[in-house]
Image (spheres, rainbow, N blue to C red):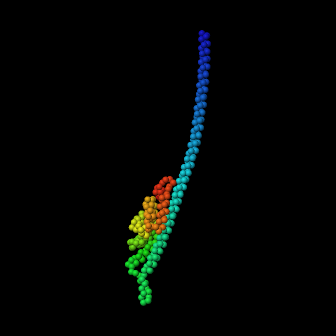
Amino acid sequence: MIVNLKTLSLGFVLASFMLSGCSSITMLRTKEMRAVGDDVIAKNDSAYKALSAENAALRAELDSVKAQLDASAVAQKRLQAEVTVLSNRMSEETVRRDTRQEEIIYRLDLLLGKSDKILAKKVVVNNGVASAVMEPDANAEKMVEAETMFNAAHSDYHRGEYKLAYNGFKQVYELVKKGEMAEGALYWMSLCLMEANQPAKAKTLLTNLVDSNPNGMKACAGMYKLASIYGNECNLDRKKQYLQMILSNNTCASTPELEQAAISLQEMLDFKSSDGRSATEICREQMR
């Protein structure tokens, strides 16, 4: 009986030692796993911070590139606006120069016409006295009236009275109907309409002028004005067509419109945009 009690006591002691050892091992394992978990979390946090810093750097670089692109776009738009302003100024200056030149030519023609009329007079000697007698001309009075009206309309145009000038040129056209003065009246009527911001009506008059008098005195100037109107409307195909018509028309060989048409056509042929857009697309965007 005593032996059994000793055996039981020894068993309890051994069991206690075994349980105590297992508990210690479990605690060590738990500590090791916790340490490994903390290490993994620390590494993840470090990797996350590194990735966040890298993303922030990339975002800053992208923002910088975007800012540069925006600045470049603004600069390009500003440059396009400046080019447009300069082009408009050059166009206006060209119109003023052409108008002045045409006025000078017209006045010279008037002077030459008057000289021809003076030379056409007959000198009759009567009792030793020379007297000049004009050749009978049924249209002389009408032409004098037309010239007076034409000059008055010219003056109105240069004073900026475009409506008054238009009516004056219209009266001249209705009076003479045909000939160089009629062509000139139609041409100046179209200029008055352009100044009054009525390009569609001006285009109709100029088209009639060019179609009815392709080799007339104002045909080349009319074709160049039509090219300008179509260019302002971004119809570059029609603009190109009229420029080519000027270059192929022998009547325009000695006119200033020939050189102007050649320069304009060459600029159209040489045009290349930096972004691959066509000249028509850029023109329409600028009109918005």
Residue pictured at 60% horizontal, 20% vertical: 18
**Quarter of the rendering containing residue 118:** bottom left
Residue pictured at 43% horizontal, 79% vertical: 117
Which quarter of the image is occupied by the N terminus?
Answer: top right
Residue pictured at 60% horizontal, 33% vertical: 39
Residue sitting at the far left: 138
Q: Position of residue 109 (x, y in %)?
A: 46, 74
Q: Position of residue 105 (x, y in %)?
A: 47, 72
Q: Answer yes or no: is residue 207 visible.
A: yes
Residue pictured at 39% horizontal, 80% vertical: 136
Decide: is 171 above or below 72. Answer: below
Q: Relative to the observer, which residue lies in front, 96 or 197?
A: 96
Decide: is 32 above or below 117. Answer: above
Q: Relative to the observer, which residue lies in front, 20 or 270?
A: 270
- Tally the marks: 0
Q: Position of residue 228 (x, y in %)?
A: 46, 63
Q: Answer yes or no: is residue 196 visible.
A: no
